[in-house]
Amino acid sequence: MVRVGGIIVIGAIFAVLAVSFFFYSDEVLTDVKVSSFGEPVQVGDVMFDVQYVTNFDFLQKTKEFKLAEKAEIDRGLIEASNEKPTHTYFQIQVTAENKGNDIVRFTGGQLHLYDGSNKRFSPIFVGYGDNELSLIDLEPQKAVTMTTQFDIEYDEEMQYRVGIVPNRHGMDGTQEIAFICIKNCS
């Protein structure tokens, strides 16, 4: 009697785990989109067009940003950004168009640069102008064009891709991520 009861309990536990996994996986599994050179890609309600711009050895901060940054540093909230990169600033231009009917929050932290060996680089906010990507609330049916940069050891022959990864700071309503080849695509 104990064996039959034990088998039923163990079977019930596995059944509950299977049903739970089915519903959980439907919520968390992501759809990965891959785009070739120059092709826009849609992630959630936002259509992205990402292009390589150029490399910089120096990006000058605006006077207004320097004052605001100093106040934040004095309060201990942030560390100073660098006008001069450790290696090279690899700059990209991002056009994001909200195709949906709701405001979508988009941040620079949702973009990552990947080189040919899949090394990931996070964007660097310098504060050089109004068109630098930091935090944007994309209005429905409108597009914005911004730039951001990555501090990398640039290799002319290396393939570079941008990953668009929604997170809790923006675009959190989608289960899609995208990778867009922007340099030396084959």
Image (spheres, rainbow, N blue to C red):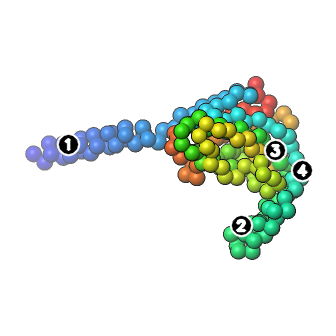
Choose the circle earlier in sequence order: 2 or 3: 2
What is the secondary structure assignment of the residue under circle 1?
A: helix
Residue 31, position in %: x, y? Answer: 53, 34
Residue 81, position in %: x, y? Answer: 79, 61
Q: Which residue is mark 2?
A: 78
Q: Which residue is mark 3?
A: 90
Q: Judge whether 153 appears above or below 33 on screen.
A: below
Choose the circle earlier in sequence order: 4 or 1: 1
Residue 52 shown left or right of residue 171 in the figure: right
Q: Which residue is mark 1?
A: 7
Of badges 1 and 3, the one in the foreground is 3
What's the amino acid at mark 2? Ile
What is the secondary structure assignment of the residue under circle 3?
A: strand
Residue drawn at 53 percent across, 46 percent down: 172
Q: Is residue 100 visible?
A: yes
Q: Nearer the viewer, residue 130 or 47?
A: 130
